[in-house]
Image (cartoon, helix red, strand yellow):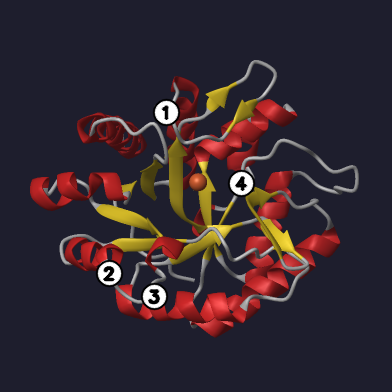
Amino acid sequence: MQKPAPLGMGLGLRPIYYPDILEGKPNVDWFEIISENYMVPGGRPLAMLDKIRADYPIVMHGVSMSIGSTAPLDMDYLTKLKALAERVEPQWVSDHLCWTGVHGVNLHDLMPIPYTEEAVAHVAGRIGRVQDFLGRRIAIENVSSYVTFESSEMDEWTFVQEIAERADCWLLLDVNNIFVSGFNHDFRGSEFLHSIRPERVVQMHLAGHSDCDTHKIDTHDQPICEDVFVLYAEACRHFGPVSTMIERDDNFPPFAELMAELDRAREIAAAVEIEAAA
Ligand SMILES: [Fe+2]
């Protein structure tokens, strides 16, 4: 199992930053797109993407696969996803370890799954079918959660690792999601990280969240906090060089501020590499 080579430090491609990217040609190693935003027949989004694709590697990240649902796989969605992947030729395609709807209702949210053996088998089987259909191995991301299930039989990290092995898929680890869920459910992020096999991890997400005293919410509208940078350094030590990017989805700062955050992540990863080589 050969992991794709690390891409370096990337950003989530958001329309508000198209001019900064197209005119400034910033020192970003790659961009991640939200797949659904480009699953359209034509127009501005695809025209912008084609231009940016000419200069930067692209990774596709979806929010609608609903891999954890008990509803049948949405073959119309997967057909459009496959067509986009054929056009974009991304380094890889990812989605979330969650469900987003059932019985024809789309909740437009990333809902958690009970951590049971039954769910491992169910989700791993679905990932296998998606991978067969797309003709490529996909990456699955851990989500933030705000509830736990009485029926859960294992820790989240055991669940995530088990599914990756059973489905033979990649993992996209969201360091902020680990931190947020760790606070909400009282576990240590480092325990999560150290339970995941490095050979499965192709990508990491960094993002900001909102602090509500009793719980934290994964809002992607704040700068990355110090605790998440500390956890990121620990992840770099455990996983080695992994493609990393920042997700910012609201309360958009000037592009230079996002670049400063990306430089901070770059410095952390570089310092860990020097530490490992010493
Ligand atoms: Fe994420």
Q: Nearer the viewer, mark 2 or mark 1?
A: 2
Residue pictured at 43% horizontal, 64% vertical: 35
Marks 2/4: CA–CA distance: 31 Å
Label 1 neighbour load within 10 Å: few <14, some 14-19, many 20+:
many
Marks 1/3: CA–CA distance: 30 Å
Label 4 neighbour load within 10 Å: few <14, some 14-19, many 20+:
many
Marks 4/1: CA–CA distance: 17 Å
Residue pictured at 54% horizontal, 77% vertical: 78
Residue beneath disc 4? 143
User: 218 and 140: which one is in front?
Assistant: 218
User: Which percent across, then down, holds residue 152?
Assistant: 85, 47
Task: Relative to 195, say whether 66 is above or below.
Answer: below
Q: Which mark is residue 84?
A: 3
User: Which percent across, then down, holds residue 195?
Assistant: 64, 45
Residue beneath disc 2? 43
* Image marks 4 and 1: residues in contact by CB distance under 8 Å: no
Q: Is residue 166 left or right of residue 150?
A: left
Residue beneath disc 1? 224
Q: Nearer the viewer, mark 2 or mark 3?
A: 2
Q: Earlier in the sequence, mark 2 or mark 4?
A: 2
- The amino acid type found where label 1 is placed reads Ile
Q: Secondary structure at mark 2?
A: loop
Q: Is residue 190 left or right of residue 266?
A: right
User: Which percent across, then down, holds residue 74?
Assistant: 63, 76
- The amino acid type found where label 2 is placed reads Gly
Task: Relative to 273, say whether 124 is above or below.
Answer: below
Residue 236 found in image quarter: top left
Judge whether residue 187 can be spotted in this image: no
